[in-house]
Image (spheres, helix red, strand yellow):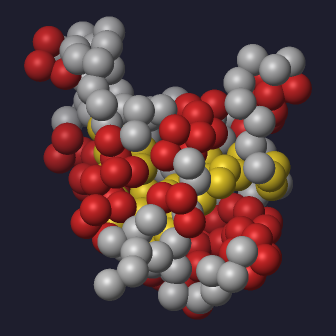
Amino acid sequence: MEKRAGIFLDRDGTINEDFEYVVSPIRLELLPKAAEGIRLFNEFGILVAVVSNQSAVGRGYCTEEDVEEVNRALASLLQEHGAKVDAFYYCPHHPEARIPAYRVACPFRKPEPGMVLRAAFELRIDPRKSYVIGDMASDIELGRRVRARTVLVRTGHGNETLQRVRRKEVPKPNFVAEDLSEAAWWVLEDMDRRGLV
């Protein structure tokens, strides 16, 4: 069976508000038009995987169970808006984590490709046909490393990242979108041009 295109989405600052560390469902708030963007992918049968660095675990601000609880709450909140994420992946590690067990240079921590490669294997997605969407330079670099196309959203830290792009400090994305909805429309048009939908 041929592998298909998919969407690899950052979480905090791309789908939901980024309040430094989102460690509890109580702090969970969808960004405007985020559910709309994910719903567009769903309507076209395109798989959506969230790939998120969650160094708050390694820093001792929350547990892996807390991250999973937030992911479940986010999935439920999106479902209320008619949108669905097919799988959630996260990396709790950080090279300078306060908790020794999490203090590693992990191959799953963005921009390393581990989360995308795992998702691609489990969901039968071809990263080269796919898209990485996020608000951070690490999202754009991740896309470059797996040879996916990239979209920088101007939500979360997106405007700061865009300034770094303009100063040529970080890789240039294939497209810059105001929000996840605009990103989804561009991706669908680009997929059509590439004969992927």
Identify the residue shown where x is 34% and y is 51%.
117
Q: Is the N terminus in the top left, top right, bottom left or bottom right quadrant?
A: bottom left
Identify the residue shown where x is 75% and y is 17%.
169
Quadrant location of residue 63? top left
- The mark total stands at 0
Q: Is residue 160 above or below residue 22?
A: above
Say left or right for 110 vs 12: left
Where does residue 164 sit, x and y in percent of width and height?
A: 78, 22
Is there any visible trace of residue 74 in the rendered image? no
Identify the residue shown where x is 70% and y is 52%.
151
Where does residue 136 sit, x and y in percent of width and height?
A: 62, 35
**Residue at the right extreme, as displayed:** 166
Q: Is residue 82 above or below residue 114?
A: below
Q: Is the C terminus in the top left, top right, bottom left or bottom right quadrant?
A: bottom right
In depth, the one of 54 and 47 nearer the eye is 47
**Residue at the left extreme, as displayed:** 101
In depth, the one of 41 and 64 nearer the eye is 41
Is there any visible trace of residue 183 in the rendered image? yes
Identify the residue shown where x is 71% and y is 24%.
170
Where does residue 89 sit, x and y in percent of width and height?
A: 32, 52
Quadrant location of residue 19? top right
Q: Is residue 45 above or below residue 116?
A: below
In depth, the one of 109 and 75 nearer the eye is 109
Say left or right for 51 vs 130: left
Where does residue 44 sit, x and y in percent of width and height?
A: 59, 88
